[in-house]
Amino acid sequence: MLNGIFQRPYLNNNQAFVRKKQDEEKNASAQREQQTDQNSRSKGLQYVEKQSPEYEQQVDWRQMRSQIQAQARQNVKEPVQQTRSSTINIAQILKDFRNTATAIGTPDNLKEEVNGYLSLIETQVKKENPNTKLVKSNLKNASSILDSYISETLNKDSKVVENWVDALFLQQIDFKYDESIINPQFLVKFPEGSTVEENKIQEKNVVEDSVTEPVQQESETNSKVVSLVPQDKELKSLFIQSKKLTYAGKPEKAIETFAKAIERADEVGDIETKSKIFYEVGRIYDDHSFLSEALKSYNQSIKITSDNNVKTKAHYSMAQIYDDINQVEPALDHYFNSISFAGEAENLSAQSTSLAKMGNIYTEMYDNQGFQYYSTAENLAEQTDNARVKGFISASMADAYETFGNSKGALKAYSNAVKHYTEADSPLKTAQNYTKAADIMVDFSNIDKAKGLLTKAQSYAIRTDDLNLINEIKGKLDSLSLLG
């Protein structure tokens, strides 16, 4: 699944581009040399050798992640997180373990085996004096089952669940079972309901909008005309019919029609259309939270295509899945691959979006080096006219500034987000960012300014159908009115 393309981003004072590491070994294979030569032609991400003294600001994300994990193990506290606790209750661990098993689409027979170990743990921790060694042993056994399934499914050795369990063992585990005790610091993000949340869809659309959908006859990218629709009439008809069924909310029929399209693609030898079909099927599974099937489809799409736009979107979608279930390593891997292929496709918008998502991961782990990713993403986005992408990056930076207690930086970034989202005609996002800025003003006891921002937020919110946001803003305005 993973192509082993490991770039390392850095900040360049002049260009602020992310560059791919060239082969450092003198005896590198001809295949890798060829890959490096191809990547060096990217118009978006530029690449340089590691030894170049000009770029001392290089950042190795794997090293950064190791530092973050070490920091977590030592329970190092950020100034704005003085009340954070490194204690996690065993009940929360068991719940998150089960959620993870569900999220990756574990087959029923394996899930039953995993639940067997978890049930033994649950029985043990409800005792007066639980055997902690037995608890840890059973957690390791359960994690091994999930990792084996992930490795088999994705054709890559995986220890993501085992690594998560190992990290938990380095924390202070409360073995007295209590479901009411939740430590937000260790919550595993998991998509609720039968479909993905609105935010996930909107974020994914940032990349989707930046690369042309294959329902048009052709698209011109930097003077390169790329055929996007099947030339075979029957295959074209099946493909478009499948897309219409998807948009009509008929996923099962859409997948059935896509299956016929795959058969036709095989008959006429159209590999590129076949890869696009796998990608579209992956999206359907993804949108309905069949994550294991989605990963398989995205992976099949990547394996057979030579279209860098398809690879960009598929890797991004896979990264989103892992990001949503808090699996940091594979999420970063796929964001990086998305960046690499977007560079080959000269797609600055997709590159900057993935960089911002990586920044979000580090921010969630309370590592302020994520700002380097935001900065690089911002500089790349400035070279485009994609206001929605610019808004997404500014909003991400604003949230990060707020996380680290930099209210001044947050207000400036929220202001930029409002500007960009207004330009992109996105009233929902505009209202949300006005609201966040108003919350900061309330913290500063600047009630008049907060009211002004909320009034603006309200004017944009009423242009949407988000009744929750409209009521939230109204409630805040009513509360502030009581203060004078």
Image (cartoon, rainbow, N blue to C red):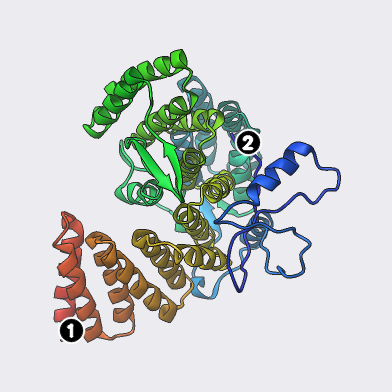
Label 1 Cα crowd, 10 Å radius (few <14 / some 14-19 / many 20+):
few
Quadrant of the rendered image containing residue 131? top right
Query: Residue 32 shows which numbered tag?
Result: none
Query: Residue 483 shows which numbered tag?
Result: 1
Quadrant of the rendered image containing residue 235? top left
Q: Residue at x 63, y 36 (%)?
A: 158
Q: Is residue 410 above or below residue 219?
A: below
x%, y% of residue 293?
A: 44, 28
Q: Residue at x 28, y 61 (%)?
A: 424
Say what secondary structure mark 2 lies in: loop
Say what secondary structure mark 1 lies in: loop
Q: Is residue 317 above or below residue 229?
A: below
x%, y% of residue 37?
A: 69, 47
Label 2 Cα crowd, 10 Å radius (few <14 / some 14-19 / many 20+):
some
- Specify whether 122 is left or right of 238: right
- Specify whether 228 is left or right of 149: left
The answer to whether residue 192 is visible is: yes
Query: Residue 158 shows which numbered tag?
Result: 2
Amino acid type shown at disc 1: Leu
